[in-house]
Amino acid sequence: MTHVRSYQGGCHCGRVRFEVRLDLSCLRPLDCDCSICRKKGFVHAIVPRSEFLLLSGEDALSTYTFGTHVAQHRFCATCGMHPFYTPRSHPEDVDVNLRCLDDDVLDGLEIERFDGRHWEESVGALRQPTPENREPR
């Protein structure tokens, strides 16, 4: 039984707004300690692109890439917030910053640590089961 619900979020100034559909009972939030995530304070929720909708602010977004240039780090050019991006590990998906949701969904969730400093050795741990195969927590 799934408990999928829509959440809205955005950047600090409000120019960038999005909606994402999540099932908190089987969500796997990650705290990555790689050089960029640690500095941004990003709490990751990787979702299929079909579960994400950019509501407004495409024109306010800038993109930063480095290394392999696969990850597309999107941020608001006005306030600098990073509400979502295209992750290197799942380039077909969207990685939402749970801290940028309007609702405080982090209370009660167990946030897993991800060893991003050793990304190449750790990325296999990010292979998530499909929603149909996930066990609720």
Image (cartoon, grey):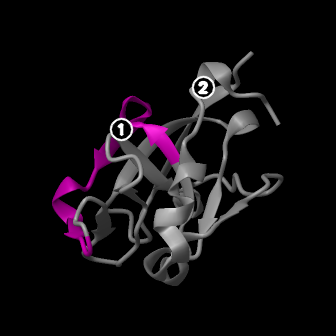
**Residue 26 sits in quarter:** top right
Q: Residues within 10 Å of mark 2 (few under 14, many from 20)?
A: few
The one of 128 and 83 positioned closer to us in this rendering: 128
Q: Residue at x 54, y 50 (%)?
A: 124
Residue 1 spot, x, y in % from top left:
75, 15
The one of 114 and 22 positioned closer to us in this rendering: 114
Which disc is residue 131 wearing?
Answer: 2
Taking the image as shown, residue 100 lies to the left or right of residue 60, namely: right
Residue 90 spot, x, y in % from top left:
40, 46
**What is the C-alpha distance between the residues marked 1 and 2?**
19 Å
**Residue 22 sits in quarter:** top right
Q: Amino acid at mark 1?
A: Leu
Q: Tell whether label 2 touches label 1 (CB within 8 Å).
A: no
Q: Residue at x 75, y 35 (%)?
A: 25
Q: Residue at x 70, y 25 (%)?
A: 3
User: Mark 1 or mark 2: which is in front?
Assistant: 2
SS assignment at label 1: strand
Number of numbered callouts drawn:
2
Q: Is residue 128 magenta?
A: no
Taking the image as shown, residue 80 lies to the left or right of residue 19, namely: left
Looking at the image, tell me whether mark 1 or mark 2 is earlier in sequence order.
Answer: 1
Report which residue position mark 1 lands on: 53
Magenta range: 46-67
Q: Amino acid at mark 2?
A: Pro
Taking the image as shown, residue 9 lies to the left or right of residue 56, namely: right
Residue 116 spot, x, y in % from top left:
54, 71
